[in-house]
Image (tube, rainbow, N blue to C red):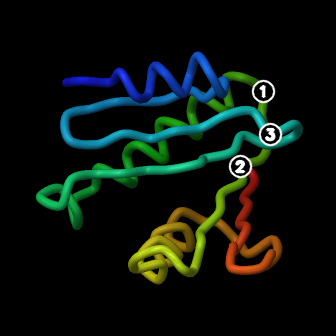
Amino acid sequence: MDDIYLKYRKEREGIEYILVEGAFAVFKDAGDYCYLEDIYCIEELRGSKISYELAQKVEDIAKKAGYKKMIGSINIQAKNPEISLKACFNQGYKILKLDGSVIWLHKEI
């Protein structure tokens, strides 16, 4: 599993990540929130519970770090934004605000 790009982003931007076979989650400190920046899984794993499990792992890490809230975003111009939005709603996220083409979501943990 090659995670050189994620290591690069961690060094350069301060992100944290969870990497598993065929999928990853990227998150970082956003002041009062833990920002769940991205979850990606290869096409063969879509529809499985891997994205849900990664989101749960990020929340567990955030709780242990003392965060009380999560934040996430979806660009509606990205491919299939409705799938991401549905997944966020299923995870308990609520809409925080709309900023141009980006929907910001949040949840208490």
The answer for how far apart the CA atoms under marks 1 and 2 are is 11 Å
Counting other residues with Cα less than 10 Å from the Cα at mark 3, is it few (<14), some (14-19), or many (20 or more)? few
Mark nearer the N terminus (3 vs 1): 3
**Quadrant containing the N terminus in the rendered view:** top left
Q: Residue at x 77, y 47 (%)?
A: 69
Q: Report x, y in % for residue 70.
A: 71, 49
- Based on the displayed image, in which of its 4 quarters is residue 107 positioned? bottom right
From the image, state whether disc 1 or disc 2 is nearer to you: 2
Q: Residue at x 17, y 56 (%)?
A: 45
Mark nearer the N terminus (2 vs 3): 3
**Residue with the mark numbered 1:** 66
Dot 2 amino acid type: Met
Dot 3 amino acid type: Ala
**Residue with the mark numbered 2:** 70
Counting other residues with Cα less than 10 Å from the Cα at mark 2, is it few (<14), some (14-19), or many (20 or more)? many
Question: In the displayed structure, does residue 86 sit left or right of residue 37?
Answer: left
CB of mark 1 within 8 Å of CB of mark 2?
no
- Secondary structure of the residue carrying numbered label 2: strand
Q: Report x, y in % for residue 40.
A: 36, 51
Q: Is residue 95 above or below residue 71?
A: below
**Residue with the mark numbered 3:** 30
Q: Residue at x 80, y 39 (%)?
A: 30
Dot 1 amino acid type: Gly
Q: Nearer the viewer, residue 9 or 18?
A: 9
Question: In the displayed structure, does residue 75 sit left or right of residue 4?
Answer: right
Q: Residue at x 11, y 58 (%)?
A: 44
